Image: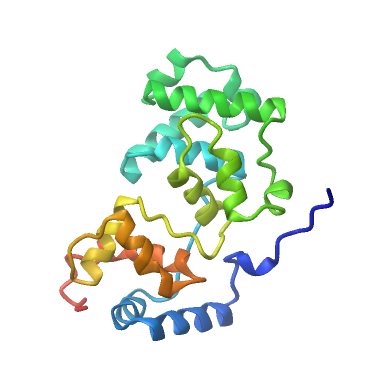
Amino acid sequence: MIRVRVSADIFLTMTQDDSFNITGHLAGCDDKLARLIKKIGSPKIEKLASDPFAALVRSITSQQLNGDAAKTIFNRLKESADNNISPATLSRLSHETLSALGLSRAKASCILELAQKTAEGTIDVTPENLMLQSDEEIIKNLCVVKGIGPWTVHMLLLFQLQRKDVWPVTDFGVRKGYGLAWQTEMPTAKQLEAIGDKFKPYRSLVAWYCWRAIDLKDDPDYIV
C-alpha cells in the first residue's frame, strides 16, 4: 500500500502571522480565552526531546508526576543511557537500575517493552514514519505497549510532533487550568471533551493556554 505524507496543516509549526491569525480566531470563539491570550501572548510550545523515541520515554516518565520531578528522573535516565536515549542504550538497563533512578516498576517495564518493540521494528517512531500517520493512527499503534495510554501519546503529539488539534482531556493541568480561567468547577474529562469542540482545529493551543492559566492563579493583574 502506498502511503502519502499527511497534510502539513496538521502541524503546529507557525509563522508569526500564523500565530496571530490562529490566536485571533480562538479569541473570537470565547471571551474568557480572549482575555487569557491577551494576558499571556503568543504560544511557545517547546519540544520534549531530540527525537520522538526520547520524547515518548519522557512522556512515560512524566505520567502522574509534576514537571520538576519528571525532569529530574528523566535526566537521571539520560545519564544512565550515556546521554543518548535510544532503544539500544535503554535495552541494556535492568528493571533494578531503572527503579533506582526513581521510576516505578510499571514505568520501567513500559520503557523496556517500548525499547524492545522499537528495536525489533514492531513499533516505528521515526519522524519519517510518524509523518505518514494521523493522530488516531499514532495513538492506536503506540498503545499496544503496556503502560502507554492516550495521555502519553497526546504529549508526544502535542509537544514533539506539534500537531495542532490535540485535546488531552485526561490531563489534570488542562482540566484545572480550564476551571480557573473560566471560573467554574474543574470539568471532568468527558465534560472537557465536549467543551473543546468549538476550539477545533486548534485545541492544542487551547490546552497550552489552560496550562499557563495555572501560573496566573495568583496574579492580581489577571482578571478573567
Q: Is residue 112 above or below residue 184?
A: above
Q: Visible in this render: residue 81?
A: no
Residue 15 at x, y percent in the picture: 60, 75
Extreme right residue here? 2
Residue 102, x across and y down, in percent: 36, 25
Residue at position x 60%, y 44% in the image: 52
Numbered disc total: 0
Instruction: Tell me the colour scheme of the image.
Output: rainbow
Rendering quarter of residue 210: bottom left
What residue do we see at 25% from left, 70% from top? 181
- Give residue 66's position: percent from left, percent from top: 31, 43
Q: Position of residue 146 (x, y in %)?
A: 49, 29
State which quadrant residue 213 falls in. bottom left
Would you say 210 lies left or right of 160 here? left
Query: Which quadrant of the view contains residue 216?
Result: bottom left
Front residue of 116 and 68: 116
* Residue beneath the point at 72% across and 30% down: 121
The answer to which of 156 and 184 lies nearer the viewer is 184
**Residue at coordinates 49% horizontally, 59% vertically from top-left?**
166
Tell me: 189 left or right of 139. left
Q: Is residue 3 left or right of residue 92?
A: right
Residue 196 visible in the shown view: yes
Toward the viewer: 48 or 59? 59
Q: Is 122 displayed left or right of 168 in the figure?
A: right
Q: Quadrant of the C terminus?
A: bottom left
Q: Is residue 140 above or below residue 169?
A: above
